[in-house]
Image (tube, rainbow, N blue to C red):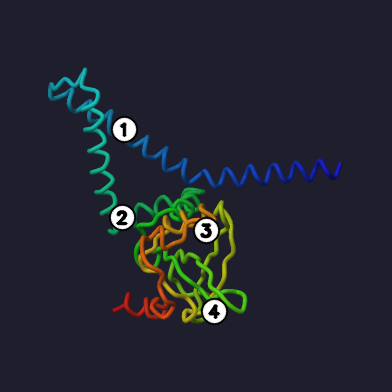
């Protein structure tokens, strides 16, 4: 009986892990297709009202809709950095679950700026020698003064990991690396090195910028 419960528990845990790993991807895909459908319908109505027939021009129509979608997303991307976006976000934050879904999806966003920018960093290893490569999902100071949160993800499926509070002097920024680069590195299980992914030569440790220096440069 105990074995059956253990198997069921293991089965349920993996189902939930799979669900929460797929949720951000599914949400983004759903939103893109939903936007495409809405833009397609609105554009069709506009063309119909002004007397332009688009029947039989399916390829050109799809291309036009995609162009409008890209332009729309660009405009929204510009608005994101304005007070208008903050107003809408404050309004939607009152909806249960919105904040959680937003934070999960934001993990995959490599274009974040300021204190929410994702940094790929090197920290001193937990043994006597060596280093670890991790992620900083923000540059907000930890509850411990002069310490910052670094996440070390699992490989090859980076849907779990460990969080550590590290002193800023022991964190070094890989300036050309992004969240996507680190994801490729994790999925390859080290078969691909970051030098291959970033297309750079290996860098001596004294050439890396420490987080302390990086923060000073950012605040200038």
Of 89 and 18, nearer the camera is 18
> Residue placed at 48% from the left, 64% from the top?
135
Upstream in sequence: badge 2 or badge 1: 1
Residue found at the far left of this picture = 51
User: Residue 80 at what x, y percent from top left?
Assistant: 31, 55
> Residue placed at 47% from the left, 40% from the top?
26
Question: What label does residue 144 carry, if any?
Answer: 4
Q: Nearer the viewer, mark 2 or mark 3?
A: 3
Q: CA distance from mark 2 to mark 1?
A: 21 Å
- Image mark count: 4
Whether the residues at callouts 3 and 4 have beta carbons within 8 Å, the answer is no
Image quarter of residue 178: bottom left
Upstream in sequence: badge 2 or badge 4: 2
For the residue labelled by badge 4, is the local secondary structure a helix, a strand or a loop?
loop
Left or right of 213 in this view: 72: left
For the residue labelled by badge 3, is the local secondary structure a helix, a strand or a loop?
loop
Q: Which residue is mark 1?
A: 38
Q: CA distance from mark 2 to mark 3?
A: 36 Å
Q: CA distance from mark 2 to mark 4?
A: 31 Å
Upstream in sequence: badge 3 or badge 4: 4
Q: CA distance from mark 1 to mark 4?
A: 48 Å
Q: CA distance from mark 3 to mark 4?
A: 32 Å
Left or right of 31 in this view: 13: right
Q: Nearer the viewer, mark 3 or mark 1?
A: 3
Question: What label does residue 80 carry, if any?
Answer: 2
Residue found at the far right of this picture = 1
Whether the residues at callouts 2 and 3 have beta carbons within 8 Å, the answer is no
Q: Is residue 196 depicted above or below 49 in this figure?
A: below
Upstream in sequence: badge 1 or badge 4: 1
> Residue placed at 24% from the left, 23% from the top?
58
Upstream in sequence: badge 3 or badge 1: 1
């Amino acid at each position: 009986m105990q074995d059956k419960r253990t198997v069921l528990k293991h089965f349920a845990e993996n189902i939930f892990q799979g669900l929460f790993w797929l949720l951000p991807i599914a949400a983004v895909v759903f939103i893109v297709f939903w936007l495409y459908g809405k833009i397609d319908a609105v554009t069709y109505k506009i063309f119909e009202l002004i007397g332009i027939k688009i029947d039989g021009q399916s390829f050109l129509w799809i291309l036009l809709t995609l162009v409008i979608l890209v332009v729309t997303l660009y405009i929204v991307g510009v608005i994101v950095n304005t007070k208008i976006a903050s107003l809408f976000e404050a309004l939607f934050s009152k909806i249960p679950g919105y904040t959680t879904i937003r934070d999960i999806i934001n993990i995959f966003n490599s274009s974040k700026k300021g204190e929410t920018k994702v940094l790929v960093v090197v920290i001193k290893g937990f043994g006597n020698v060596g280093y670890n490569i991790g992620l900083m999902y923000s540059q907000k100071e930890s509850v411990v003064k002069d310490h910052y949160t670094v996440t070390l993800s699992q490989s090859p499926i980076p849907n779990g990991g460990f969080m550590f509070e590290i002193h800023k002097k022991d964190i070094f920024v890989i300036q050309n690396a992004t969240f996507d680069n680190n994801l490729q590195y994790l999925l390859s299980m080290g078969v691909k090195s970051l030098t291959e992914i970033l297309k750079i030569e290996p860098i001596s440790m004294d050439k890396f910028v420490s987080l302390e220096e990086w923060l000073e440069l950012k605040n200038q």
